[in-house]
Amino acid sequence: MDKIKELYLKYKEIINYFIVGVLTTLVNFVVYYGCVFTILDPNDGFQLQVAIVLAWIAAVAFAYYANRKYVFESKNPDIIKEGAAFFAARIGTLLLEAGMMALFVTLLGFNDKVMKLIVQVLVMIANYVFSKFFVFTKKKTEVIETEVTE
């Protein structure tokens, strides 16, 4: 049991990021299906897009909160600025995903199911990198305070 705890503590950030990612996907699905099974008609193109956007917004909002609290353990008091940076990064990776899918599926004719999986892995990596190095950056004082308390 000590070995498992040691491995968890060593890879805590990555493990928690994976768990939050799974839960974020679940939030996306629940909101999307909640919308299309109750108030929005997925056969209407506009309403379908509304359901997709609402699900994306809910998932990104959940992801911000969970990543802030459980993955990167941010203590940044400027939640508005940090949240805006998080949403901007996620919009960037959304555009990256759309662009890559357009290139590889629409223009080059690759299989959309295979490309979706490959692109999703790249998006997850990009989301982690943006979150770690641009959104939830720790100031030198935070790093020193963390080291002192440990």
Image (cartoon, rainbow, N blue to C red):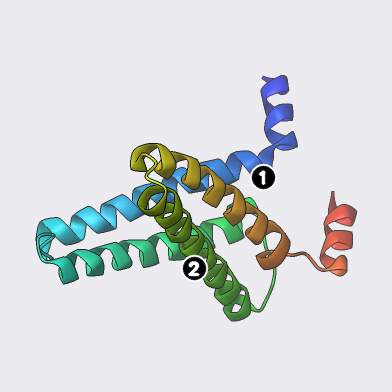
Task: Locate residue 134: give its quadrant.
Answer: bottom right
Q: How crowded is mark 1: few (under 14 residues within 10 Å), some or many (20 or more)?
A: some
Q: How crowded is mark 2: few (under 14 residues within 10 Å), some or many (20 or more)?
A: few
Q: Compute the Cα span from label 2 to label 1.
A: 23 Å
Task: Locate residue 31: give its quadrant.
Answer: bottom left
Q: Which of marks 2 and 1 is nearer the N terminus?
A: 1
- Residue 138, percent from left and from top: 77, 64
Judged left or right of residue 38, residue 74 is right
Viewer-side residue, 73 vs 85: 85
Viewer-side residue, 150 vs 97: 97
Residue 95, placed above or below residue 85:
above
Q: Which residue appears farthest toward the front when viewing the image?
A: 108
Residue 96, placed above or below residue 139:
above
Residue 140, numbered label: none
- Residue 88, percent from left and from top: 55, 72
Residue occupied by mark 2: 91
What's the amino acid at mark 2? Answer: Ile
Q: Is there a contact, CB below 8 Å, between mark 2 and mark 1?
A: no
Residue 13, numbered label: 1
Q: How many labels does the image show?
A: 2
What's the amino acid at mark 1? Answer: Glu
Residue 110, placed above or below residue 59:
above
Name the residue rendered at 40%, 53% in the picture: 107
- Residue 69, percent from left and from top: 59, 58
Foreground label between 2 and 1: 2
Name the residue rendered at 30%, 51% in the picture: 29
- Residue 99, percent from left and from top: 46, 60
Image quadrant occupied by the N terminus:
top right
Q: Which element type, helix, strand or loop, lies under badge 1?
A: helix
Q: Which element type, helix, strand or loop, lies under badge 2?
A: helix
Judged left or right of residue 13, residue 147 is right
